[in-house]
Image (tube, rainbow, N blue to C red):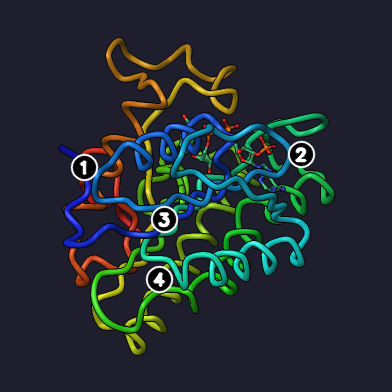
Amino acid sequence: MGLLSFSEPIRAAVIGASGGIGRAFAENLAADPAVGAVLATARQGAVPEGERIAPLRLDLEEEASIAAAAATAKDRLGGLDLVIVATGILRGPGIDPEKSFRQLDSAVMARVLAVNTIGPALVARHFLPLLPRNGRAILAALSARVGSIGDNALGGWHSYRASKAALNMLIRNFAIEEARRNADAIIVGLHPGTVATDLSAPFRRSVADGRLFTPDEAARRLLATLDGLAPADSGGVFAYDGQRLPD
Ligand SMILES: NC(=O)c1ccc[n+]([C@@H]2O[C@H](COP(=O)([O-])OP(=O)(O)OC[C@H]3O[C@@H](n4cnc5c(N)ncnc54)[C@H](OP(=O)(O)O)[C@@H]3O)[C@@H](O)[C@H]2O)c1
């Protein structure tokens, strides 16, 4: 029994299928009887292999590669029913989440926004036209609870928080726009909880026992969350337990 209750086998794409959570999405989708084909994109890392998985290269900082991947999805599958954007950065060479405004660096901010905000927006630009005009269709982007302005009591992580807050705004905008094209479309952000991936590795000390998910648990919970959403939910950000996050 799969996690998705689409009535016919669907065409799915996972952007960032080389990442911890993205890989688990691709594996779970490829094993789901409701899914006929999975396009799995990566910038440089390896994506899972499987009969129903087609690997593609896509670098969020190179728009031509996003356009080319969308064109391939159209040629090979005629369109897509489910697009999951599972990319993102929090840290990396020369990038650390800022604790104070004194640590702000324009090049770091630009890079974090390029990957976490502009990249997913460009994916929407090229992939939303591939969703059907009628019936259930979903584009979901991995956001984070820390992108909620209403939920922010701690501060810090300026670039990452701002990049996710801006992503959440774009998701709301795209949901409004897409509803005019297909009233059943669902465009949402997702919060996976704290998940044991490279991204979270240095920041897990304060996570309570039982609250650190494996990538597989996170992907399964998020697929179940997506399955429970209705068009009226479009534009929101939802956590792994199905709860809507404050704006
Ligand atoms: N892990 C957590 O606890 C947690 C909590 C809240 C939210 N999230 C969010 O969940 C999402 C996935 O995170 P994760 O934990 O799975 O991280 P991860 O294991 O570090 O994976 C990150 C993914 O992003 C891709 N990526 C980075 N820069 C890219 C670019 N320029 N173009 C294309 N792909 C790029 C990486 O591709 P390559 O491998 O090809 O470089 C990789 O597939 C992120 O949006 C993150 O903010 C995670």
Q: CA separation, marks 2 and 3?
A: 42 Å
Q: Nearer the viewer, residue 11 or 200?
A: 11
Q: Which mark is residue 21?
A: none
| Residue plotted at (44% across, 76% down) | 173
**In which quarter of the view is residue 218 placed?**
top left
Where is residue 109 drawn, in percent x and y?
A: 74, 49
Q: CA separation, marks 1 and 4?
A: 25 Å
Kindly report which numbered mark, 4 or 3, lies closer to the viewer in this rendering: 3
How many C-alpha atoms fall within 10 Å of the one at disc 3: few (<14), some, or many (≥20)?
many
Asked if the residue at tag 1 contacts the one at tag 3, i.e. Cβ–Cβ closer than 8 Å, the answer is: no
Where is residue 209 drawn, in percent x and y?
A: 30, 10
For label 2, the residue is 102
For label 1, the residue is 3
How many C-alpha atoms fall within 10 Å of the one at disc 2: few (<14), some, or many (≥20)?
few
Task: Name the N-terminal-most of marks 2 and 1.
Answer: 1
Task: Name the N-terminal-most of marks 1 and 4.
Answer: 1
For label 3, the residue is 12
Where is residue 181 drawn, in percent x and y?
A: 36, 88
Kindly report which numbered mark, 2 or 1, lies closer to the viewer in this rendering: 1
Q: Secondary structure at mark 1?
A: loop
